[in-house]
Image: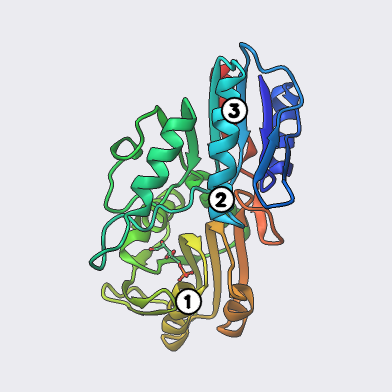
Amino acid sequence: MIITSCGNSELLARKITSKLHAKYSPLTLSSFPDGDLYLQYNTELKNKVVVIVQSFQPHPAQSLFDLIFAGQTAKDLGAKKVILVAPYLAYMRQDKRFHPGECISSRIMARLLSHSFDKIITIDPHLHRYKSLREIFAIPSVKLSANNLLAEYIKKHFHKEVIVGPDGESYQWAEEIAHHINVQATVLKKTRFTSRHVEVKMVLPIPVKGKDVVIVDDIISTGHTIVEAAKTVRKMGARSISAVAVHGLFVEDAIKKLKKAGVGKIITTNSIAGKTALIDISLLLVKELKKEL
Ligand code: R5P
């Protein structure tokens, strides 16, 4: 098995490689003077299982492009199987035409990757209107979940907490985690006006006064969703507010905004590298990749 990455997830890819006792081979990825992409494998791929580990953040558009070139080149070079491990898979939230003329990005992303890989493995993809990745991918797809890891982290680091999901879609994470650690949970109702303007309200109230509230979501992007959830529980008398999420994108100064809104601890998995990435998902991926050895 040969493992590589297109830049974003190199640390994670190397960690997985050493746990699998496989070979990590860096890709040469650069551009010609005119900006055309240049890509070169630096090891023999013939009849090998090639695994490309790449989260789509930062630079989701470039990542998609790099992966199309990398996947198709590995096939060209005779790899037995080419697997994409995308711990964070972007483009999933645009899963319908919200306004006339819009593209349904998730379908196009899946079609392009299906042409370039033999299999995709991802962690907690944003499945909302699709029930399964099979609805959009033409290749075998594996959806892993970091829920147990998040639950164990919360259990170890918090005490008598309550869990709040900031919107209806977060029930898959918030409610399941609350159930796992046996604490109370509620899911807020979110209205999204634009990418940067959301409003939330608690429609199924639970007592938060004097409690440590842990807001759980799959993605923190601009941070507005968590900020609004934090404001809501603070008004209701929460003692402390923390945020735990699978994928920490943290665009547009999200961390600053969260801190300003009184969110004390911010914890994510290392699906995307960063200071908040305290929950390690490498073993989850190693366990799945062992099936390919
Ligand atoms: C969407 O429903 C997701 O689960 C997240 O709540 C959302 O992507 C967070 O985005 P932002 O941080 O920009 O509010």
As drawn, is 150 to the left or to the right of 203? right
Residue at mark 3: 73
Name the quadrant where ligand 1 sits: bottom left
Q: Is mark 1 within 8 Å of ligand 1?
A: yes
Q: Nearer the viewer, mark 3 or mark 2?
A: 3
Residue 56 shows which numbered tag?
Answer: 2
Residue at (76% x, 26% y) in the render: 42
Give the spatial CA distance, label 1 vs label 2: 20 Å
Closer-to-camera residue (108/153) = 108
Q: Position of residue 170 (x, y in %)?
A: 38, 60
Q: Secondary structure at mark 2?
A: loop
Residue 177 shows which numbered tag?
Answer: none
Q: Position of residue 262 (x, y in %)?
A: 58, 82
**Amino acid marked by disc 1:** His
Q: Is residue 190 above or below residue 220?
A: below
Q: Position of residue 134 (x, y in %)?
A: 32, 35
Q: Position of residue 94 (x, y in %)?
A: 35, 58
